[in-house]
Image (cartoon, grey):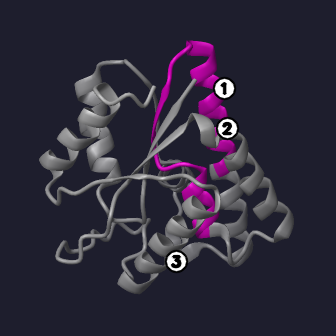
Amino acid sequence: MRTVSLSGAFNTGKSTVFNEVKNKTNGKFHYATDGGRAILEELGVTREKLSINDQKNLQMMILEHYLREEADARNENKDILSDSYMIETLAYGLPILGDYNIKLIHNLIEQRKDLLTVIKFPIIEEVKMNDDGLRDTDREYQKTIDRRIGEILYLHGIKPIELTKKDVQGRVEEVLLHILHDDIF
């Protein structure tokens, strides 16, 4: 079972592209939604209401979400297309998770890296950030998360596929090209 992760900082278009690709691939994959957004929506919580301890717990809940998605994909005998992944969980959680949880997530990534393809969504400066109350809108924080993701990928020797298109349709086509036609499986 392989995982294709649409990876990048918040507000880079991952979920928009994920939903378009999901519609165009008609059940070919097990589709793992963005854990953070799903959990925040389920709990009815916005980012402003989260204490540091709540943020730590949220990151661990997100990790559990991705582990459940992997188990579901194994049961379905399907590869995973994931809107974010453990890499983002680690990038967001680095300042708050503590050594044990950071090592745990690094170990999980290391165990999976040979079956992981990362499609990296770069920040598009000219695109206005969408404030939905769940995600941050601070451009500097977005850059920090993007940098951390790059560092995590480098640390684990994961060479991402870098998207080059800036528009949604172009990005959808790029992702489809890679997941349906490249030899990544």
Tell me, for residue 48, which label it has, or none.
Answer: 3
The reply to whether the magenta stretch includes residue 99 is no
Residue 181 vertical position relative to residue 109 in the rendered view, above or below: above
**Left of 43 or right of it: where is 30?**
left
Q: Amino acid at mark 2?
A: Leu
Q: Quadrant of residue 184?
A: top left
- Give the magenta range: 63-92
Judged by its main secondary structure, the magenta piece is helix
Q: Amino acid at mark 3?
A: Glu
Tell me, for residue 67, which label it has, or none.
Answer: 2
Q: Position of residue 83 (x, y in %)?
A: 43, 45
Residue tagged 1:
71
**Label 2 CA crowd tier, 10 Å (few <14, some 14–19, many 20+):** some
Q: Amino acid at mark 1?
A: Ala
Tell me, for residue 99, which label it has, or none.
Answer: none
Q: Are marks 3 and 2 in contact (CB under 8 Å)?
A: no
Residue 84 vertical position relative to residue 130 in the rendered view, above or below: above
**Left of 17 or right of it: where is 83?**
right
The reply to whether the magenta stretch includes residue 90 is yes
Q: Position of residue 41 (x, y in %)?
A: 48, 53
Residue at horizontal 40 percent and vertical 69 percent from the top: 133
**Label 1 CA crowd tier, 10 Å (few <14, some 14–19, many 20+):** few
Residue at horizontal 27 percent and vertical 73 percent from the top: 129
**Label 3 CA crowd tier, 10 Å (few <14, some 14–19, many 20+):** few
**Left of 12 or right of it: where is 105?**
right
Q: Are marks 2 and 1 in contact (CB under 8 Å)?
A: yes
Residue 137 vertical position relative to residue 156 in the rendered view, above or below: below
